[in-house]
Image: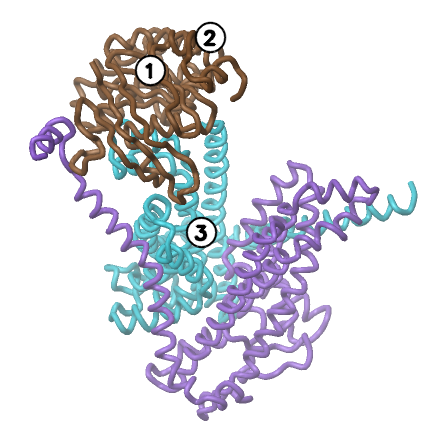
Amino acid sequence: MNRGEVAEKLVKAGLLGAALISVAVLLIVVAYIVLKGVGTINLEFLTQAQYRFGRGGGIFPQIIGSLGLVGVCLLFAVPLGVASAIYLAEYAPNNLVTESVRFFVACLAGIPSIVIGLFGLVFLVYYLHLGVSLLSGGLALGFMILPWTVRASEEAIKAVPQSYREASLALGVTKLQTIRRIVLKSAYPGIITGVLLGTGKAIGETAVVLLTAGSGLESFLPRSIFDPVASLPVYVYLLATTGNTSEQLERAFGASLVLITLFLLMSIFALVLRDRYFKRMRGRGGG
Amino acid sequence: MSDSAQRCAGAFGSFRGGLAERLVEKLLFICALSSILIVFFIIAFILKEGIPVLALGPDFFFGMTWKPGQGQFGVVPTVLSTFIVGIGALGIAAVIGIPAAIYLAEFAPEWLRALIKPSVEMLVGIPSIVLGFFGLMVLVVFIRDNIGGWGECILAGWVILAVMTLPHVISISEDALRAVPRTYKEASLGLGATPLQTIRKILVPNARSGILASLILGMGNAIGETMAVLMVIGNPNIPWIPSSVLEPVRVLTSTIVIEISYVVWGSTHQHALFALGVILFSIVAVLNAITTALIRKGIRTGCR
Amino acid sequence: MSKIETIGLSVYYGDGTVCGLKAVNITIEANKITALIGPSGCGKTTFLRALNRMNELKGAQTKGKVLIDGIDIYNGKVDVIQLRKRIGMVFQQPNPFPMSIYDNVAYGPRIHGQRNENLGTIVEESLKKAALWDEVKDRLDENALGFSGGQQQRLCIARALAVNPEIILFDEPCSALDPVSTARIEELLTELKQEYTIVIVTHNMQQAARVSDCTAFFLMGELIEYGKTSQIFERPKDKRTEDYITGRFG
């Protein structure tokens, strides 16, 4: 082996190492949280409310609160996002209006979450008098994931072969019916994938929820959408930054584990679904 | 004519359901406008809340002291710290991310790509609070015990933000590298250049606007990131300009989160925090605009 | 009896540069198979898609008249939905929907308001007419995408038949099929013409000669020659038709 070859091998190994770092980081973080958190997980932790600022009790209201926030967020963002995507993919003429819709969707995607949190605080909480509540938090999260829903849905809709639409229209089926019965039916796995990825984002989002939904340590369940709610990320944030006892840190790890489990489940499900979906679409062989 | 019209109606029906179709189209159009509306509302409301302090002019934009208690709202130390943390993180992400992208685009066997790509995608989404918590419990302790200082510092912020930026850098750079026409590469290899020489002389130069775009986008993300960075950079009571990477600092996002929970609504302090929001938004918007322009340029020249 | 008649039918595409159709006058007989031949890009598919107004989907401008049973389908009062119900279309690539055989065939009638109890009969009859029933009768709830290309194309024919059209347009229906499947479809076409008026675009001259009663030769958007298939193939009047038929270009 001459020097050139050795150099090639070394550089290649270096490149491989760089590529593996991201996998390694993911594994290390997940493993660390699992190891530190698994001891805390038990039935009581998952089904009780916390007391004495997280020194005791569990995270039941936080789990329910997080799921509730994500629920409101999806109720807002999914219909709006899918409708926008249908318009962009099926109806939109190539003009200035359509271009600006796409541009602003990209803009919204680029806005830092803390700015969305500030907006939620001034607009939803104060201006619309919705208060620090489940509704405010869910809507603010909805603003955050709306662009992702639009993009994912638009891509999924555009991936439906044109020949399906033509076949349906040629049977004398209206455009609207064609969209409902053929396009959306073929595109929905792609749309669900996008929605799941957005959900993963929303469930872990802290800054937005901290400013609009509640302190994170509420030990009660909201009775209406106008009540403040606890949430997993804010709970972790408070205990991790202000907690100083081992009980609090243990609980922060436990809650992190629950959070990361929810996130990983959604991501893996989304990725698997997408993989299958694209295989199926490709399997169509151009038809 | 009327006779023929009637026969038409008999044979082909008339506009049945046409109205509903058009109504739905209008409705969908209105939904599509919602994104524009939301962005406008965000800008309008953040700006409106920030204006009383933005109007302070030089005292705000060039002021060196941030002491809300004494009515001093100078943003220079905070903005400077934000850039220091963002650029440093980006440097680390670039050093790891670009080689990683080259490996994935040029050398990785299919199975390894199938392993790395989803991990990278998942790393984007890992809740930043969890990464921040990990940083606080592991990274900060490591720095304190082995390097010195308080542990909560710029260096910790760099590392955590680099981890969060890495996925963007890797995936956009890889796309850019893959978009370089294969013929260029074959021509270079055909002339007897080694694969590494080809990468250095042909692939990377041709993909440079895409790679640059990934870095600037990454920086936008790093600067806008809140929770993870908040948890590891220490946040001293008064923002300052650091003199070492082992010192704690305050950035725009962490200042907003920490102080918003105890401001009096309607006070100058509250307006000042929204003014920070305006600055943050503007910085990120400019960086995103540059990214978009670079990606467009890449498309135009045919090799991103 | 004439079923379709076009008078000065011209089609332009959006930018005006792409050649569409130039003032085509033609009369197509009922219960006959009319083949449209010509080199690719000559306008035969554009002509076909003008007959059920599918060109509109791609933003084409149409001038002139298309009379079906004497009624101009570009008349502002004609409902394109009703029109397309009367004129079925089968495409170049088999394009069944990603759903079961049954649902594919039932798709049209269901949307057009057929009651569920009638659907079974419609599906069976349509599949029988498309010569597919015997092969799929035990597999009606299997996904259509799992069948062979030839079966898929016959399924598409059945799907078109299910909405009970009078005219069926075939756009190179065999170009993606193997010779055996092609033969079956050709056989099917001759059976179908008892009941339907058939217009078929083909780039295969043997196919046109085998199945059609009349043949129209298109070149650069113009109708060059139209007549009985035997006449077109044996005694073409136009030099260009003869050149094409004998394989001197195209």
Depth order, front residue of C188/A168: C188
| A50 relative to C103 in the view: left or right | right
Query: Can you identify the residue that label 2 sits on?
Result: C180
Residue at (61%, 53%) from the top-left corner?
B301
The residue at which mark 3 appears reads as A200
When the figure is inspected, residue A107 is found, relative to residue A87, above or below; the finding is below
State which quadrant residue A156 falls in.
top left
Tell me which chain appears brown.
Answer: C
Identity, as a three-letter code, of the amino acid under mark 2: Val
Foreground: disc 2 or disc 3: 2
Q: Residue at x 69, y 49 (%)?
A: B102
Mark linked to residue C233: none
Quadrant in which the N terminus of chain C is drawn: top left
Dot 1 or dot 2, earlier in sequence:
1
Q: Quadrant of residue A208?
A: bottom left
Q: Secondary structure at mark 3?
A: helix
Farthest residue in the right direction? Answer: A2
Q: Nearer the viewer, residue B144 or A247?
A: B144
Colour used to depict chain B in the structure image? purple
Which residue has dot 1 on it? C34
